[in-house]
Image (spheres, rainbow, N blue to C red):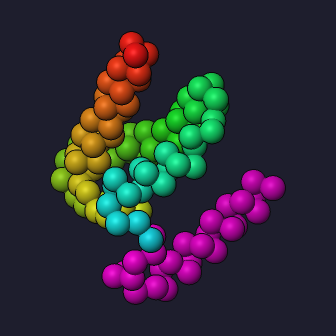
C-alpha cells in the first residue's frame, strides 16, 4: 500500500508539473482565510484530538524545514494562502502558535 501511496503522489506531481505555474490551485485568499477554514473544520474536536491533529500536521512541516539550508531561508515557497520566504513562514508559525497560547491562557482564566 505504501508503494501505491507513493505512486498516487507521483501521479499528482506529474499533473502539477504540466500546469501553468501561475494558475491558482487553492481557493484561499490569505493566511487568515485559510486559518478560518481550518478552525471551522476542527471546532468540534476534543482537546486531545485537536492536539494530536496539530502534532500530525506539524511533523511533516518540521521534517521539510529541517532539510532546507539556512542560506535558503530567503527563498519563496508557495503555500495554499500565498507565497512566503522560509523565514517568514517560520516566524508566522511561531507567532501563530504563541497567539493560540495567549488565547488559551485568556480563555482558561475566564
Q: Nearer the viewer, residue 92 or 36?
A: 36
Q: Quadrant of residue 22?
A: bottom left
Q: Is residue 1 above or below residue 98?
A: below
Residue 38 is situated, as x and y percent measured from the top left of the image, at 50, 50
Identify the residue at the far front of this view.
110
Q: Nearer the viewer, residue 62 or 56?
A: 56
Residue 97 is situated, as x and y percent measured from the top left of the image, at 36, 32
Residue 89 is situated, as x and y percent measured from the top left of the image, at 29, 48
Q: Which region is colored magenta?
A: 1-26
Quick one: quadrant of the N terminus? bottom right
Looking at the image, residue 71 sits to the left or right of residue 42; the answer is left
Q: Is residue 19 visible?
A: yes
What count of labels does the image hold? Answer: 0
Q: Is residue 10 magenta?
A: yes
Q: Quadrant of residue 78?
A: bottom left
Looking at the image, residue 98 sits to the left or right of residue 26; the answer is left
Q: Residue at x 53, y 42 (%)?
A: 57
Q: Is residue 33 magenta?
A: no
Looking at the image, residue 70 sits to the left or right of residue 12; the answer is left
Q: Is residue 101 visible?
A: no
Residue 2 is situated, as x and y percent measured from the top left of the image, at 75, 54
Identify the residue at the far right of this view.
1
Q: Residue at x 63, y 65 (%)?
A: 9
Predominant secondary structure, magenta span: helix
Quick one: quadrant of the C terminus? top left
Q: Is residue 50 above or below residue 41?
A: above
Q: Is residue 1 above or below residue 24?
A: above
Q: Nearer the viewer, residue 82 or 39?
A: 39
Q: Residue at x 22, y 48 (%)?
A: 88
Q: Residue at x 46, y 85 (%)?
A: 19
Amino acid at each position: 500500500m505504501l508503494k501505491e501511496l507513493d505512486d498516487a503522489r507521483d501521479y499528482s506531481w506529474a499533473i502539477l508539473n504540466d500546469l501553468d505555474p501561475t494558475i491558482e490551485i487553492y481557493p484561499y485568499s490569505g493566511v487568515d482565510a485559510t486559518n478560518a477554514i481550518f478552525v471551522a473544520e476542527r471546532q468540534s474536536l476534543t482537546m486531545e484530538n485537536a492536539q494530536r491533529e496539530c502534532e500530525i500536521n506539524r511533523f511533516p512541516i518540521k521534517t521539510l524545514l529541517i532539510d532546507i539550508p539556512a542560506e535558503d531561508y530567503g527563498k519563496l515557497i508557495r503555500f495554499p494562502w500565498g507565497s512566503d520566504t522560509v523565514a517568514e513562514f517560520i516566524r508566522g508559525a511561531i507567532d501563530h502558535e504563541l497567539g493560540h497560547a495567549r488565547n488559551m491562557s485568556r480563555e482558561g482564566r475566564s
